[in-house]
Amino acid sequence: MALRKKLCEGSNFNGKIMDSFARYYSSMMDLRKLKPMIQKRIQNRAKDYPVPAMVPVAQEVFNSRRLVMQGVSTLLKMAPVLACKFCPEVYIGEKGHLIQTCYGFKRRGKNRVHEWIVGGLKDVLVPVEAFHLKHMFQDVIKHHQRFDFERVPAVVELCWQAGANDGNYLNWNSESDCVGVDGAEFLSSDELILVASGTLRAWEILRNGVEKLLMVYPAKVCKHCSEVHVGPSGHKARLCGIFKYESWQGTHFWRKANVDDLVPPKIVWRRRPHDPQVLLNEGRGFYGHAPAVVELCTQAGAIAPPKYHCMMKLQGMIENGVQDGSQNQLNAYCPSVGA
Ligand SMILES: [Zn+2]
Ligand SMILES: [Zn+2]
């Protein structure tokens, strides 16, 4: 008691507390005064966008995306793609593999063989949609506004925000960009290789371009449900998890999005010439992987860029003799890809 009294008297203790309250209160006041200034700064920031140097990149991404969709649609008329009925697994081939990685529905248990059905474009090029913003620095979209904003492919939204213009800005039509070449059945093998090589090249340009755009334009992805938002803030329009069959419905947990979130590579198992006709669970350590588009295009005769060779276990096969294969040798080539 005596100490407190001494403190109060000696150092004007109460006065200091009142001071800090007053300062806090005045800073609240300042915030209110600052708001118009902050809004003005945000508006001014919007004037710096789109960044002129990135407009050609956005345009190139836009065009490549369309080419990839058309190319894959064309190739799918010739090559079979299978999808699992219970989980997101995809396989490019006549017969599905027997590798036991199905986690399907909970009641089926883990590590089951997949149940294959005929797949399509969406299994190779996984659709990722986002809200189309009226302008990049608009206010955060609220839940009650969720029907006021159109859903468009996230890459398209990124390109639009980055200044690409396809003349289709106001009436986006998802049908228009996934039409394959007519008469694909009658393409010669040389023509097919041309389509496959062009598609693979466009896929690389698309992914590289998106990577560049994401260095300049912010995009977010939810850690829990993979919802993507193109723009500096997240949104509050859709609840987390409701579209992904998850039980909890809360706010999203946003983190910075990368190219895989906007253009999912959709990694598939792949069969090499010496592998058995149907991939077996026992051999899974020896089989390669590839993004579904890369696998589809290489099966149709395109040559995979070197960066995929280790994942596809191509070097492992040639230089290390996978036939008598040791798991360690393979992993040494490609430590990032597990069996
Ligand atoms: Zn499955
Ligand atoms: Zn979420």
Image (spheres, rainbow, N blue to C red):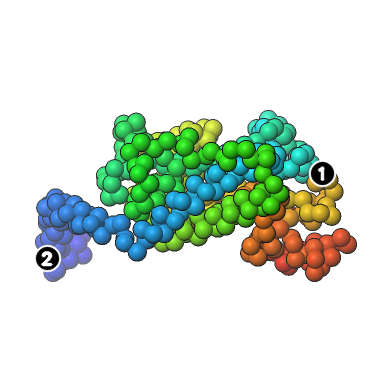
Give me the C-alpha separation between circle 2 and circle 1: 84 Å
Residue 83: image location, x then y, percent: 67, 37
**Residue nearest the viewer, comparing 149 with 284:** 149
Q: What residue sits right under mark 1 in the picture?
A: 278
Asked if residue 175 lies left or right of residue 216, the reply is right
Q: Secondary structure at mark 1?
A: loop
Q: Residue at x 87, y 60 (%)?
A: 323
Name the amino acid type tagged 2.
Answer: Asn
> Is 314 drawn above or below residue 36 in the view shown?
below
Q: What residue sits right under mark 2 in the picture?
A: 12
Quadrant (top left/top right/bottom left/bottom right) for the C terminus = bottom right
Q: Residue at x 64, y 44 (%)?
A: 75
Quadrant (top left/top right/bottom left/bottom right) for the N terminus = bottom left
Instruction: Give the image quarter of residue 79.
Output: top right
Residue 227: image location, x then y, percent: 46, 42
Q: Which mark is residue 175?
A: none
Within-10-Å neighbours for mark 2: few <14, some 14–19, many 20+: few
Within-10-Å neighbours for mark 1: few <14, some 14–19, many 20+: some
User: Quick check: can you spot residue 23?
Assistant: yes
Q: Secondary structure at mark 2?
A: loop
Residue situated furthest right in the rendering = 324
Residue 115: image location, x then y, percent: 73, 33
User: Quick check: can you spot residue 223?
Assistant: no
**Residue nearest the viewer, comparing 213 with 8:** 213
Q: Is mark 2 within 8 Å of ligand 2?
A: no
Q: Residue at x 48, y 40 (%)?
A: 177
